Image: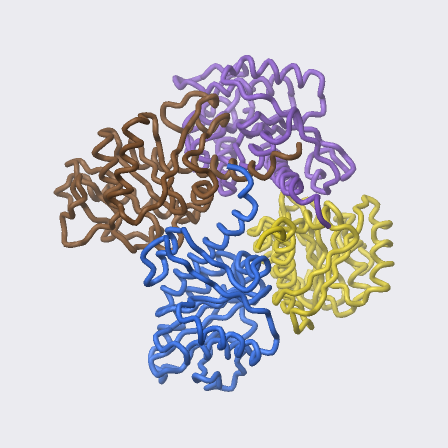
Chain colours: A purple, B brown, C blue, D yellow
Amino acid sequence: MDNHGNFTEIAEQLIATGRFIDSKAWVPATSGNFSARLQDGSIAITVSGAHKGRLKIEDIMVVDSFGCSFDNRRPSAETLLHTALYRRYFDVQAILHPHPLNATLISKLFEGRIVLEGYELLKAFSGIETHESQLVIPVFANNQNIAELASVIDEYLDTHDECRAYLIAGHGIYVWAESVPVCLRHLEALDFLFECELRLLHGVAKR
Amino acid sequence: MDNHGNFTEIAEQLIATGRFIDSKAWVPATSGNFSARLQDGSIAITVSGAHKGRLKIEDIMVVDSFGCSFDNRRPSAETLLHTALYRRYFDVQAILHPHPLNATLISKLFEGRIVLEGYELLKAFSGIETHESQLVIPVFANNQNIAELASVIDEYLDTHDECRAYLIAGHGIYVWAESVPVCLRHLEALDFLFECELRLLHGVAKR
Amino acid sequence: MDNHGNFTEIAEQLIATGRFIDSKAWVPATSGNFSARLQDGSIAITVSGAHKGRLKIEDIMVVDSFGCSFDNRRPSAETLLHTALYRRYFDVQAILHPHPLNATLISKLFEGRIVLEGYELLKAFSGIETHESQLVIPVFANNQNIAELASVIDEYLDTHDECRAYLIAGHGIYVWAESVPVCLRHLEALDFLFECELRLLHGVAKR
Amino acid sequence: MDNHGNFTEIAEQLIATGRFIDSKAWVPATSGNFSARLQDGSIAITVSGAHKGRLKIEDIMVVDSFGCSFDNRRPSAETLLHTALYRRYFDVQAILHPHPLNATLISKLFEGRIVLEGYELLKAFSGIETHESQLVIPVFANNQNIAELASVIDEYLDTHDECRAYLIAGHGIYVWAESVPVCLRHLEALDFLFECELRLLHGVAKR
């Protein structure tokens, strides 16, 4: 597959990332999918149905920027959500879509969006320099019609330049960044901040 | 024991499954039991009293489809709940019965049944294609008289074809499927969904 | 030390038990102590100040049944709570005293005692055959004067034959049994049951 | 770097401590920083941006007691909070600053300070002999201007001799002690006590 340039290197990054993400229980059953942009502009993405904590190199396929497969395998329907992000943001190199418990709960409890502010850990995001920043994560309704879902997301992103990640209700999170490790750092920070918000929902009564 | 066909292979699957399940703390103390159907129609099942995270091949015995032992060992009383499921569903090949905390709590907090809906992870179940599905898990009262308990369960299953798993109050969960790995995937998905439901019980007040 | 009979074997059991207990985070900092009766009637017990998840054989000392050291080392003050149990119950061979979070919380939230009932996992206790049993765990006020504390405990145990474990408020749990592995099984079951009770405190409102 | 005396030994202690702290998920993303005093009075401290669970020896730099680097690398801004503590307390040899979830939540839920009392585990702190002690942990407002933050902290410490640790709201905890292992023991005890306090916030209603 190395006619795409750095497939092997990127695939190994995705495999290692999957092991870490699974160690956090963020991809229960065979949920989630991960991708990264290759040197020739095509996209390496996990195949549907594989366990994301035990990925093998053959569990990662290559599609073009519209989600068409370069080999015989049919990509998962959600591949289109990945390619839409790569087409929109030229500097995005990696996208992680796990199903963490905290993200799922946030997506059920917060309607429309969650605003994260006042946390030092916001500085884990590239370009955020102070805890006084606001990070807004939109929550979209789930939809098995991926084209419709993609269109709702596109409309939002058209008018929200600063968006770093989105939630799909009862489903999971999409987060993107300029490299696989940075994307994972953002995911790790978001999970921490989501857990804070969830636990603070119950603790505001007493001091 | 390989006069039953694939005993060794199936036993190794149950042992590995036990290690995974124990790593999630779903079989505290020596609780739970696991089984799988063998090629000759007999049932491999864990013996009573063994720690399910540290199973050895001699901790797995073989019974016929009515729970009669093929060797000297007396099977656990709950073996009858396993064999009843194998007799009812010809395509069921594996049954897992752990005691996870989340299942135990759900079984104490929800009377009669819990309905899971609106989760993408419902698609982890074979045959479920959309988060708009409903998965109904019945909750039965616990009973040390296994024959009585089996009869209550049978009566329910006679009229609920789509049932995938059941809870016994204050006790644990039974889940069955067409293979050991698929059964484990269903269990992993159910634990995630149960934890969501438990945490949502406390978080509905504020958004 | 093997003039006491089976010191080496028992010490290795305590070391392995400590590793398991630490993996559950039940002995934060250097808290807790563990003991077992040796063949000659003396008691092997962990020294004060050692980390219970990284015990070495020299972290286990031997005392007589009144807590007097057989070597130069001064035993921890709480050794007297262990020896009192060994003198009272001739069939007790092992005592575990960790500081699990759940036990600490239960000891703060329940005054005087907690009653566990309706759980299948009660059957993890030797001699309990049905979930319809009641297991009563008393909670004693903490006291740095161990002689006073021992006297309060003795008074309770004089009139409660069936007692299997006790809590000290804000402190931890003592559990005893006929062997180290059985004692650990009881501890594992109690932690599970305590966590159930804690989470049910918050979940009774909605079904 | 061993012209500072014991750099290699201390750096290895910080690396091992980072692995333990990361195993507890107390340094999400690349948050936190750790330091220790060297034999010549200079300070070994983790560089900014490194993952604290996977530190290498080159991720630890040396500064003087006013935070000036001995090599080309620019220390993190928060280095000044470390050096202020080393200048104030001559017997402090180690400082740990992770971002644990529990500390972050406590810092959001308790205004000004949290008082810990009635816990046996308070005895994990050097010099505390009874659960009847009070341990007061102040909570300071977060501030990206480290000089201002340091000045607020200094003012507090001038009048509170017995202070063992402080929280910065939405940020994390600073804890200091006479050695790296003792500092880690204090951190482990504080995390346990913070989790107790958080869970007791929700459990006081029923017994």
> Which of the two residues, A179 or D102, is positioned nearer the viewer here?
D102
- Relative placement, left or right, of D9 versus C117 is right
Quadrant containing the C terminus of chain B in the rendered view: top right
- In the image, residue D37 sits, relative to residue B204, either above or below, namely below
- In the image, residue B33 sits, relative to residue B41, either above or below, namely below
Residue at 38%, 57% in the rendered image: C133
Residue B187 in sight from this viewpoint: yes
Residue at 64%, 20% in the rendered image: A90
Residue at 81%, 54% in the rendered image: D68
Q: Identify the image quadrant of residue C36.
A: bottom left
Q: Residue furthest front?
A: C159
Image location (x, y in percent) of residue D155: 87, 58
- Relative placement, left or right, of C199 versus A30 is right
Image location (x, y in percent) of residue D166: 75, 56
Q: Identify the image quadrant of residue C92.
A: bottom left
- In the image, residue B33 sits, relative to residue D66, either above or below, namely above
Q: Identify the image quadrant of residue C101.
A: bottom right
- Relative placement, left or right, of C57 versus D129 is left
